[in-house]
Image (cartoon, helix red, strand yellow):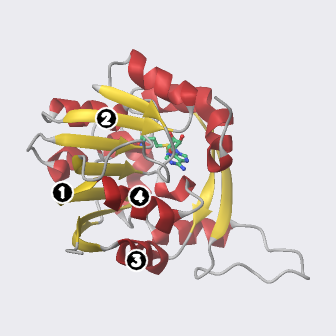
Amino acid sequence: MAARGDSKHWTEAAAQWIAWARAPNHDAFWAYRDALVDYLGTGGGQALDVGCGEGRVSRILKTRGCQVTAIDPVAELLKAAVQAQSAHDCAIAPASELPFENESFDLVVAYNVLMDVVDVPGALKEIRRVLRKEGTLFISIVHPLADLELLAETAPNAPSEPRATYFDRRRFETKIESRRLTMHFAGWAQPLEAYVGGLESAGFAITSLREPTADLTEGRDHMSRWSRFPLFLWLKARALAA
Ligand SMILES: C[S@@+](CC[C@H](N)C(=O)[O-])C[C@H]1O[C@@H](n2cnc3c(N)ncnc32)[C@H](O)[C@@H]1O
């Protein structure tokens, strides 16, 4: 399947991501995994993992007793998720076109995905459509404070261009090399108000918010800066009655 719109970057970066995400204790994810498991809780039910990548969050949901459906627009990533038996069902799809009936899921998870989506309000509206009335949406995003740090590090624009601000939706691209692995991240940073506005306009109310701190045990000293300020922001939301 050809790359569609905003999935072009992830099609190109798929092999890098599979190696990066699966290297033990490598990606930041491992410093938050236990907190994530606690925050997701138990409960089973039908869960949808939107933008599942190679499937690590789907696998957690499976061990939490959920019947898991995983979607991703990038065929190579979904193939890796299937090979690792990450989910019970899967489909190649973007968040904005979910191939499911209305109100199919008790839980929808979008873990570090919305930064990659061009039309965040459209994706949230589509997620709202497939979520059951009493269902929960769980979102993890890169914390806007961490984006701000990236913005501060960005080289100044050409004198003729206005300097980007926190309040802009802005493209980011960063290449990280660490322990003989390379990962090229790219996506959009936007202010917190834009995410919350997208939730509001899709008919969601936020019910819970966490700013998890990195677990520095097991040799994760390289993550110590993230015990001073947050790398991720976690939200749970519920659909408001229509
Ligand atoms: C940082 S990876 C996170 C993968 C996975 N959620 C995890 O935490 O391991 C971002 C994922 O978002 C997916 N993605 C990009 N654009 C998307 C879209 N429009 N709809 C759904 N997923 C998208 C990418 O293909 C990639 O798998």
Sooner in the amino-acid sequence: mark 2 or mark 4: 2
The CA distance from mark 1 to mark 4 is 14 Å
Sooner in the amino-acid sequence: mark 1 or mark 2: 2
Q: Is residue 84 above or below residue 91?
A: above
Decide which of 31, 79 is in the foreground and name it. Answer: 79
10 Å crowding of disc 3: few (<14), some (14-19), many (20+): few
Q: Is residue 74 above or below residue 157?
A: above
10 Å crowding of disc 2: few (<14), some (14-19), many (20+): many
Using the rendered image of the protein, determine whether residue 23 is visible from the camera's viewpoint: no
Which mark, residue 69?
2
* 41 sits to left or right of 182: left
Q: Position of residue 169 (x, y in %)?
A: 62, 73
Q: Secondary structure at mark 2?
A: strand
10 Å crowding of disc 4: few (<14), some (14-19), many (20+): some
Residue where numbered disc 3 is placed: 201
> What amino acid is labelled 2 in the image?
Thr
The CA distance from mark 1 to mark 2 is 15 Å
Using the rendered image of the protein, determine whether residue 233 is visible from the camera's viewpoint: yes
> What amino acid is labelled 4 in the image?
Glu
Q: Secondary structure at mark 3?
A: helix
* 171 sits to left or right of 104: right
**What residue is shown at x 18% (from left), y 57% (from top)?**
135
Q: Secondary structure at mark 4?
A: helix
Q: Position of residue 158 (x, y in %)?
A: 89, 75
* 187 sits to left or right of 42: right
10 Å crowding of disc 1: few (<14), some (14-19), many (20+): many
**What residue is shown at x 79% (from left), y 74% (from top)?**
156
Residue where numbered disc 4 is placed: 126
Which mark, residue 135?
1
Q: Is residue 170 above or below residue 63?
A: below
